[in-house]
Amino acid sequence: MSALTVSQEPDQNWDDLVRFWEEMEWPEGSKVEIIEGIVTVSPAPAYRHNVIAARIQRRLYSVIPEDWEIFQTLAIAVPSRLGMLVPDLVVAPVRDHTESDTHIPAALAELVVEVTSKSNARDDRVSKPAAYATAGIPLYLLIDRWAPDGPTATLYGEPKGDVYRPLSTAKFGEPIKLPAPFDLVIDTSEFPET
């Protein structure tokens, strides 16, 4: 099953988009995001997708500070890119967020992780990193199971405007290192392939 886009009026403002996103009754278990001003409804991630996210999460827990958390279904807002994105993993400090119960500002994230699905790989490769970089999220880890040259993990950092610099790339089977504050090597040989 692929993603469904819900068209809204092209002139709709951010507050209206967020209100629509928050108040609409979406199919249970689906992942609902606003990507470049378009509401996108995707099915729940598949088993292999979840295994990869879980293995990364387990490794991250061994290195994050006590006042940080790893979230799997937390939306992060990037209003300047008309984005309400739900990464596969978000690492962020736990704070009292009084603005909203449904999302946090993306700028609070220290790391976001996306694991591509066949139907939405372009969003994870193009639209989402542009939003994450715009928000100033220091690190973006893309686990691209559907990369043209075979499954890869790419770590992006040093955001400038809406662009990240690729810091390192590893084919599945090779390790990839996350720099400080994580100082963590992730063994991609533990990831199931497509």
Image (spheres, grey):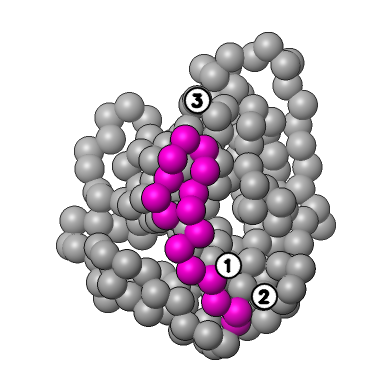
The mark that comes first in sequence, 1 or 2, is: 1
Q: Residue at x 30, y 58 (%)?
A: 69
What residue is shown with label 3? 80
Label 2, residues with CA under 10 Å away: few <14, some 14-19, many ≥20: many
Up-down: is 122 above or below 65?
Answer: above
Question: How many numbered marks have been drawn onto this rendered protein structure?
Answer: 3
Residue 104 visible somewhere in the drawing:
no
Image quadrant where residue 146 sits: bottom right
Label 1, residues with CA under 10 Å away: few <14, some 14-19, many ≥20: many
User: On residue 151, which mark appears?
Assistant: 2
Location of the C terminus (image quadrant): bottom right
Location of the N terminus (image quadrant): bottom right
Please say whether residue 106 is one of the residues in the magenta stretch.
Answer: no
Mark 1 falls on what kind of element? Answer: strand
Counting from the top left corner in percent of width and height, residue 4 is at 78, 42
40 or 151: nearer the viewer: 151
Q: CA distance from mark 1 to mark 3?
A: 25 Å
The mark that comes first in sequence, 1 or 3, is: 3
Three-letter code, disc 3: Ser
Do callouts 2 and 3 mark residues in contact (Cβ within 8 Å)? Answer: no
Q: Residue at x 54, y 19 (%)?
A: 14
Mark 2 falls on what kind of element? Answer: loop
Looking at this rendering, what residue extends furthest in the left direction? 66
Q: Is residue 36 left or right of residue 110?
A: right
User: On residue 143, which mark appears?
Assistant: 1
